[in-house]
Amino acid sequence: MSVHHESLLNHARSRWFWIALVLSIGAIVAYIWHSPGVPPNGGTWLGYTLGTIAALLIVWLMLFGLRKRSYRGGSASLRGWLSAHVYLGTSLILITLLHAGFQVGWNLHTFCLALMLIVIFSGFYGVYCYLRYPTLMTRNRESATRHAMLDEITELDQNALALADGISPKVHAVVLRSIQNTRLGGGVFAQLHARDDSDAALAGIKAALDEHERSFHASKAKSNQTIYAMVDFLASGTNDRHTDALRKLIDLISRKKSLATRVARDIQYQALMEIWLYIHVPLSFALLAALIGHIVSVFFYW
Amino acid sequence: MRWLIRRVLKQGKGAVSYEEDVHFGDQLSIGRAADQAIFIPDLRVALKHARVKITGPGRYRVDSLNLAGIRVNGELTYGLAVSAGSTIEIGSTRITLLDPPRDFEAAVEITTLDKTEQAAVHARRAKPTSLKETWLGKRLPSWLLFLGTLVLGLLIPAASHYSPVIARVITAAHLPGTTSWNPGPLDAAHRFFGDDCKRCHDTPFLQVRDRTCLSCHTQIAAHADPAKFNLPALGEARCASCHQDHHGLRGMVRTDQALCATCHTDLKTRTRNASQLADATDFGKNHPDFHINLPAWNDINVFAPQRTLLTPMVKETSGLKFNHVKHLKPDLNTPKGTRTLTCASCHTPDAGGLAMKPIQFETMCHECHTLGFDTFSPEREVPHAKVAEVGYMLDDYYARRALSGGYSDAGAPAVVQARRRPGDPPLSREQQIEALAWARNKARQVVDSIFTDRACITCHTVTPPTAETEWRIAPVRVAGIWFGEASFTHARHATMACGDCHQATTSETASDLLIPGIENCRQCHAGETGGSKVASTCIACHKYHQAEGLKLQSL
């Protein structure tokens, strides 16, 4: 068993890195050795060979989408596939540039190349995400699952409601509203921005506490001049209890806020880790169509 | 106002019972306080949470009485007019507003949600927490992009190939037509029809045929006669084997050595001795010695150069006597003082730089080699290259000098020597005869001396006249183009000194061939992989379409 962690980049002793490297060096050597008598281009025998390799690679790389959905193989073998996907995909940049003899123009063929480069570079971002975000997610969750965190939030909500109910209907309403206003997840941009609205709730409770204390002091100040001073004095004990409860409530809501923030961050990490796929995958299909157009057009007018 | 309040009670295993109650009042209060018409003992409910008013038969208005608002038909609201069938959800309770039954103005049904129903409601209200649950998708964009690209990149251009109408529409709409398939800019010569792909690619999925090339290029010479040289490779060669367009302005001719070398090996065997050409695969390593066009003339005196292997023994018969060594010596004595000649004094390149201009006596030799004939009038000269005129001219000259007198040559008769003054009587008949006899003799002597002694003989082979013929000068016959099969141009070698190739400084006779052999070229030129030398492929010197009289189209 290997001591260090095996990632998609060093899977099986970086087997696919070496394979891609050999493929790339082979292509470079062939390109240098090859002297077609015309400027190097896709129409020489080496051009056709490299083009065929590249086209087969593209189709094979796209099959990764199917492989990902099939759960028959183990996760290790899926990691192997991903490793191959990344390294062979990267070697495509070189192979296609050699295939084209570094010639570009305003045409379908270069469009195909441009699409491919966008797909590959979005894939690089994906690799970056897969290497970076899982660690961040684990650290952010603190060995809880998102489900557990959500359950805890529900529990805190209920406790907060119970506590708020004991304070005053107004505070109860504030807490009720804060529960309703807690936003976790949402649209694409909400997910990517990691927003939860627990701050507003906390502010509401704090305002309630301030107001409560102000009114308490006000009533105390007034009490000296009224015949109900005694009643107020007696009631002050109750007020203190309310203040305590409010403080407890703030505690609860703060704990909820930190949890909600973590869940929102968790959602954000997941969204960031996936968002590039919404470019990578559709553009891969555009690339496939452009590739078909490229190949057919070449033989249409060859 | 009479409200019917019906509570739905679940009794396990799906059994349901109802409990009905009547409430009087113009509004229905909902909350956790004990005085509420609908009392819901749930912490998620405010003490006075909401109220429902009747606004008409089967029509209600729901108002929230707390900050959080109330969820009506799944939407949070603070006040909303609704009709029967609407639901209000508070905590785990669902209140459905109903059409009032007979004897009632309004009716509501109260259901307590069990855990599974609550979970379902919760799930329904939950916001998406992964991108998968949002409007973002991969499948639809993938299909759209795939089909869009396929249509724009393949189908529309293909359609425009088949239908000129579609092609016009596409051009007008600025959509990508077949030009978007153009893999690279055309050669300059083909630019003028560059957008019309069909001009060359007339049949889809078929390589460009030679006939489309030959429809314009009607005058292209063949490489060799395929009937004579029955080489399959020659017959299979297409125009496009060597001429590939779409590589920009660099020209569309293959220049690599393999183009020629693959056929020009073992040529004699492969053509069954039809070709006598020696094998040539690499100029530096495998190339026969040069053959030159040695000047020669056929029976009817037409220039018919002989293809001769260039060896040191080969001599040239130009009809001229010339000594390069003598002329290249420094400080030559000339009538105008000392001069040093260089090669360029006589050999100047022609306008194209390919060959040298012919040597001209008048501009190049005459300065030293004057054709004067009489010391008494050194400015007079005989014409060059006009043999017959020399005699007439000298006859004329001496006749006039004899008749006018004053010619102080000691050998001349008195009548010729005597200076004649104006008013002197004319010469007598006898004097005239004597003077003219002298003149004729003198002219003949001078002609002899010019042809055989002083002037002509210096450079030319002179044949004295016989009874039938006049003086004859051997014709000067300079080759012109020495390399018949290769194109050599002096212009490309302007950086070299003449002496680097032509050994003129040691040549003493005109018959020396100063044409350098292959070893001379190989000092600088090698084959395609030239290393430190000039990489020279076959078509650096040779051309492919070389047949004379045989046109490609006639094959």
Image (tube, rainbow, N blue to C red):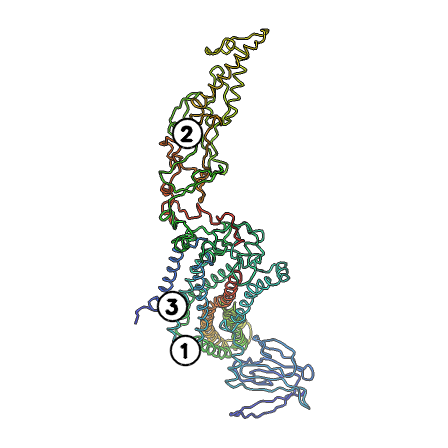
The chain that hosts pointer 3 is: A
Residues at marks 1 and 2 touching, judged by CB atoms closer than 8 Å: no
Give the CA separation, mark 3 to mark 2.
Answer: 88 Å
Which residue is denoted by mark 1 in the rendering?
A72
Camera-nearest label, 3 or 1: 1
| A134 on left or right of A110 | left
Query: In the displayed structure, would residue B103 be above or below residue A177?
Result: below
Q: Chain of mark 2?
A: B
Q: Which residue is mark 3?
A: A8
Label 3 vs 1, first from the N-terminus = 3
In this orientation, which residue lies closer to the viewer: B349 or B464? B464
Label for residue B321? Answer: 2
* Residue type indicated by callout 2: Lys
Task: Look at the picture and state if A289 lies above or below B553.
Answer: below
Q: Give the alpha-carbon distance from disc 1 to disc 2, as whole Å.
A: 98 Å
The residue nearer to you, when weighing A269 against A13, is A13
**Residue B94, horizontal then vertical, whole percent:** 57, 84
Q: Label 1 marks which chain's residue?
A: A
Depth check, front residue: B256 or A25: B256
